[in-house]
Image: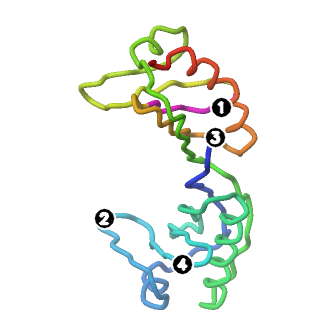
Amino acid sequence: MRPQVHNVVAGVNLNCRLDLKHIALSVRNASYRPKRFPAVVVRQREPRSTALIFRSGKMQIVGTKSVDDARLAGRKFARMLQKLGYQPRFEDFTVQNMVANVDTRMTIHLEGLMLTPGTHNYEPELFPGAAFRMVDPLVTFLVFHSGKVVLLKAKNEEDMHEAWDKFYPLLMQFRKE
């Protein structure tokens, strides 16, 4: 049982100033509401992704299922801007967050898990999951009573799998029979 990546958030610097109104009016699947959010939101189908394009030339790519897809989506969005007459340069591509989940197929005793040493938070009146923060590698786990686990904040898949390999034995100690 391995975590399955469901969302990659990446950033890239296009190194050019952009006219967001022009982009919103020229591109399909684009929306721009400057009073609500200071970026143009553009969606594409392949790879399925959303770009948040800011006036400064910074761009966030969200919704892809792999780092390679995020990079490809970013390049496609940059190409789209190039066709509009801008001269983007694809620089400083960085993965900012990866989200994955896994179903352990066992019930977890969350109260017991929260008694272990470490950085964690469990407020069942506010949120049904327990947040458990690992420092090395830097990954946060949201653990639910049902045995479902969401992994957040990983920068790459290796960190995610390393964190899971460290965390899973601890989780096994608190499974309900």
In the shown orientation, is residue 177 left or right of residue 133? left
Between marks 3 and 2 in the image, the one whose residue lies nearer the viewer: 3
Q: Colour scheme used in the picture?
A: rainbow
Amino acid of disc 2: Arg
Residue named by callout 2: 36
Between marks 3 and 1 in the image, the one whose residue lies nearer the viewer: 1
Amino acid of disc 4: Gln
Secondary structure beneath label 1: helix
Q: Are marks 2 and 1 in contact (CB under 8 Å)?
A: no
Q: Which of the two discs, 2 and 1, labels the residue nearer the N terminus?
A: 2
Q: Is residue 101 magenta?
A: no
Residue named by callout 1: 164
Q: Residue furthest front?
A: 177
| Residue 51 drawn at (x, y percent) | 53, 69
In the shown orientation, is residue 87 left or right of residue 62? right
Q: Are marks 3 and 4 in contact (CB under 8 Å)?
A: no
Secondary structure beneath label 4: strand
Question: Which quadrant does the N terminus fall into?
Answer: top right
Residues at marks 2 and 1, CA–CA distance in whole angstroms: 38 Å
Residues at marks 4 and 1, CA–CA distance in whole angstroms: 32 Å
Q: Which of the two discs, 3 and 2, labels the residue nearer the N terminus?
A: 2
Q: Are marks 4 and 2 in contact (CB under 8 Å)?
A: no
What label does residue 154 carry, if any?
A: 3
Q: Which residues are magenta?
A: 137-143
- Residue lying at 38% horizontally and 30% vertically, measured from the top left: 129
- Residue lying at 44% horizontally and 27% vertically, measured from the top left: 107
Residues at marks 4 and 2, CA–CA distance in whole angstroms: 22 Å
Q: Are marks 3 and 1 in contact (CB under 8 Å)?
A: no
Q: Which of the two discs, 4 and 1, labels the residue nearer the N terminus?
A: 4
Main SS of the magenta part reads strand
Residue named by callout 4: 44
